[in-house]
Amino acid sequence: MDFMTILQLSDSSLRLATPLLLACLAGLFSERAGIFDIGLEGKMLAAAFFSAAFAFLSGNVWIGLGVGILASVALSILHGVASITFRGNQLISGVAINFLAAGLTVVIAQTWFSQGGRTPALTGDARFSEIVLPGAASRIRDIAQQEPMGQVYSELLSGHSILVYIALLIVPLTWWVLYRTRFGLRLRAVGENPAAVDTAGISVVGLRYAAVIICGVLCGLAGAYLATGLSAGFVKDMSAGRGFIALAALIFAKWRPWEALGACLLFGFLDAVGNRFQNIELLTFLSLTFLFVVLIGGIMLILRLVALLRGKASAGSLAIPAVTLIAGLVFAIGLPALDTSQGLGAVLNAIVLPVQFMQALPYILTVVILAGFVGRAIPPRAGGEPYVKER
Amino acid sequence: MAESTYIERLFQGFERRTSGGMPLWADVILIPLVSVALALFASGLVVYFIIGENPFRAMSIMVNGAFGSAYGWGYTLFYTTNFIFTGLAVAVAFHARLFNIGGEGQAYVAGIGAAIACLLIPWPHWSLALIAVTFLTGLFGAGWAAIPAYLQAKRGSHIVITTIMFNFIAASLMIYVLNNIFTIPGSAETASVRFPEATHLPNAGAFAGFLGFRSSTPLNVSFFIALLAAVGVWLLIWRTRLGYEIRAFGHSETAAVYAGISPVKITMIAMLISGGLSGLMAINAVQGESEQLRLDFVAGAGFVGIAVALMGRSHPIGVCFAALLFGMLYQGGAELAFEMPAVSREMILVIQALVILFTGALDNMVRMPMEKLFMSMRRGAS
């Protein structure tokens, strides 16, 4: 496990975390306004298909992105009509939207392209190309020759499509909108106590529709990234449960934007490990995992320190990230140092995790996280509840 | 108990079925029929405007393909059998206000149970094998539902997401199982070896050949087990103390707790029954039809169960009729894809989605005008 491998893993973690992050923030807007959204998955899938189809037909990825977002917003509005206007069950509406997208994308793809439910492969301007930041190397051979800091810059920070950077920028933007604007305050209020918002003379229905549409736009970005950034075209069911994983990340992140970034990076990392290692020894897997724990703990610690210096957090809140960091460090250094010829090291090295386990890993981790071994998640108080004015 | 109230609130609006001055028949028959008609109408629009085919011709090909011959009936009722099991599974969970989307994975894993029962023991007669398969498929299905159920009951983990995750995990697990445990020696096919002759269930060609069924029809005796399961679910939900507790819990968790009903117990039991019913689907598909364990034998039946339960208003009779409708759509859809190559198999998924949308999420859209209509009629009469 050399430095370059770790760097490449982090790089693909970031790529794979991007669609999750966009979908997770989409869910954040919707759920903070009191509308549960199981249909993130379907909206991503619809956006993936329409963005790929129109990028192919027009040869311009931006047109594809626009149509993808429109498709996703259309499904959002359907969800809004069912759950806000007709006060239907939000879960059932979401499930219906998922099936609708899974079916319609293949039906339309078959009618338009006759390639067994996929779009033709996208090339050139029909895809989001990778942006090389100034001064960064792009070829793997050049990167390998650089200093470590240069490698981090060239491999990890540079060379992503524009949507990755947009997704990362949406995190602070979401924080600012939610906590620093009047709209954000009202949005959070409508998810906690819609009656109070109504009493203040603000439209609950209007706010909830606004939230649902923002959710649609963000899911549209997520889906377009899947089909035109991460891969080159649409294939059947390409969202592969990412919408649900994003929901789990949202619960893990306790409906907060910065935490959502951390949670999505974690899932992106698992996806990256699963992709890179087909059959992995338990020892390598554990070492990698703890390395990542160190990374997350470190980021959390820095964020908390900043908050502490600004007087927004207590010193006690440093404890959890610090313990995570230290425990992660002990294992991340200790495990690779084990002697693989005998004892525990030999046992861990002999156990090879099958490829199917690695593929199921993000789903297993989702369940583990939902099981609440990571703390209590308290959802928006009025979530899932249709608002009836006269009550 | 923040987490449990989270789930409780997810279901608000779901049980709000006060019949608002409507007669019972309008509530249980008229509204579902109108909703399904709307869903089929919307599907027709998709066929006409997107695919560019004549929806009426498509519909007649489907109905003809499903009901026009003994061959069609055999497949239609075979699919119906699957959907009765998965529909009942979703319905039982609905009564406890739990949304089990995991039928797909529960049925898939239950296939292991069927394979163990058929391959491990040399059964003298199919009826004995059937008893063992019923027991083991139910057990495996319930087992796969047990973890999400426990996490829901004890930790308040969102059961909708955990059951979906278990579907994905089941898919990976089954690929592993079919590549490493149940394999055909010397063959590249990812399937188990064929079950011995003695475990093969009699199909409709054997017990109803006089109706024109051939020996190749997939319809088999597990159809009757599905009907028995429907009766069993009716007895359970409306004629036993446990069923009463499940319904009370589904109606109001707070009231149920005051009445001394344990939420943990009801959540666990309702989900185990639900998972077990999903698992029973494997009798029909694995022991009955393919006579070996194959990849993807569930083929979406677990998800169809959601549409079936919603359309059937979670009542066994409704579930059976809704299952028949979807059996027709599946068999007719196969014929349709053959006759009209422009219409792909996924059109069924679209119809399924629209049925869920109109009978479930947009229920109030149909209900509100109906209630008004009945109100004005009543006023007119008095």
Image: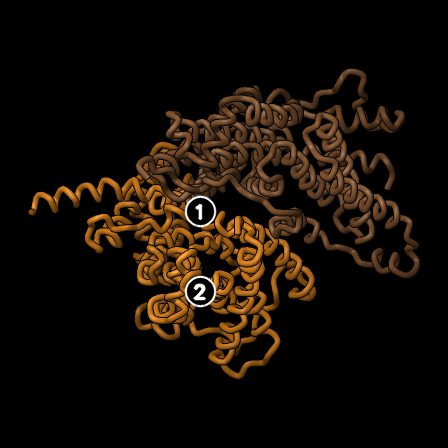
Chain letter belonging to callout 2: B
Whether residue A138 is visible: yes
Within 10 Å of disc 2 (Cα), the crowding (few <14, some 14-19, many 20+) is some
Both labels 1 and 2 in a single chain: yes
**Closer to the camera in the image, A157 or A37:** A37
Question: What's the colour of chain B in the image?
Answer: orange
According to the picture, the residue beneath numbered tag 2 turns out to be B261
Question: What's the colour of chain A in the image?
Answer: brown
* Circle 1/circle 2 CB separation < 8 Å: no
Q: Which mark is residue B9?
A: 1
Amino acid carrying label 2: it is Ile
Q: Determine the image quadrant of residue B227.
A: bottom left
The x and y percentages for residue B120 are 61, 76
Looking at the picture, does residue A64 appear above or below residue A106?
A: above
Residue B235 is left or right of residue B173, and the answer is left
Within 10 Å of disc 1 (Cα), the crowding (few <14, some 14-19, many 20+) is some
- Residue at image position (31%, 58%) is B318
Q: CA distance from mark 1 to mark 2?
A: 19 Å
- Residue at image position (42%, 45%) is A92
Q: Upstream in the sequence, badge 1 or badge 2?
A: 1
Closest to the camera, between mark 1 and mark 2, is 2
Colour setting: by chain
- Residue at image position (32%, 68%) is B212
Residue A31 is left or right of residue A84, and the answer is right
Residue A59 is left or right of residue B246, and the answer is right
Residue A195 is left or right of residue A117, and the answer is left
Amino acid carrying label 1: it is Arg
Looking at the picture, does residue A127 appear above or below residue A96?
A: above
Chain letter belonging to callout 1: B
The x and y percentages for residue B60 are 29, 47
Assign a secondary structure to mark 2: loop
